[in-house]
Image (spheres, rainbow, N blue to C red):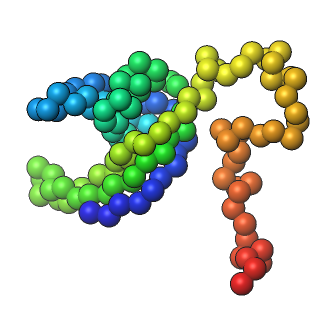
Amino acid sequence: MSIAKAVLSGIVYRNPEKRFTGNNIPVTSFTLNIDEKEQTLIRIIARGNLAESVESSVSKGDKIVIEGRLQVSSIQAEDGSEKRIMEVDLSSFESCSASSQPSAQSQNSKSDDVVKFSEVEMDDVLIGEEEIPF
């Protein structure tokens, strides 16, 4: 199993499902589609107070940005083949859906220089090799 930090943006593919551990700790999981064209699905898992918050404020179709630990593990499928599973152990999230956005009138009063994280394309952030200073 390998672990890495991940920041992902996508559309909630399935509604969150809450359950409880044997110690009565809430655990909420849902599926996030991070690529609408290819339909790349990642399972997101929240625990404790964050699980309660996810259950009450996230629903299918919402656009969200999540941060957490990416965990990749292997399991053996029923047919004997090895399957790789990707999950994110959620540490924070932010909703970018229209229902959580300010009204159009209040958006117009903001500076044009302010760019929301959800509006930034990765191609705008990545730099070419010629721009690396070493």
Residue 44 showing in the rendered view: yes
Q: How many numbered circles does the render carry?
A: 0
The answer to whether residue 83 is above or below residue 57 is below
Which image quarter holds the N terminus? bottom left
x, y (%) of residue 6?
47, 53
42 and 22: which is toward the camera: 22
Relative placement, left or right, of 59 versus 105 is: left
Quadrant position of the C terminus in the picture: bottom right
73 or 92, which is in the foreground? 92
The percent coordinates of residue 41 (x first, y second) are 41, 42
Q: Position of residue 91 (x, y in %)?
A: 42, 43
Of 94 and 15, which appears nearest the observer? 94
**Is residue 10 in view?**
no
Is 16 drawn above or below residue 126 in the view shown? above
Question: Farthest residue in the bottom direction?
Answer: 134
Across and down, in percent, residue 64 comes to: 54, 33
Q: Nearer the viewer, residue 99 or 47?
A: 47
- Residue sitting at 38 percent across and 47 percent down? 88
- Specify whether 71 is left or right of 25: right
Q: Quadrant of residue 114?
A: top right
Q: Is residue 98 left or right of residue 88?
A: right
Tell me: 79 left or right of 35.
left
Residue at screen point 47% across, 39% down: 92
Residue at image point 73% right, 76% down? 132
The residue sitting at 37% across, 39% down in the picture is 44
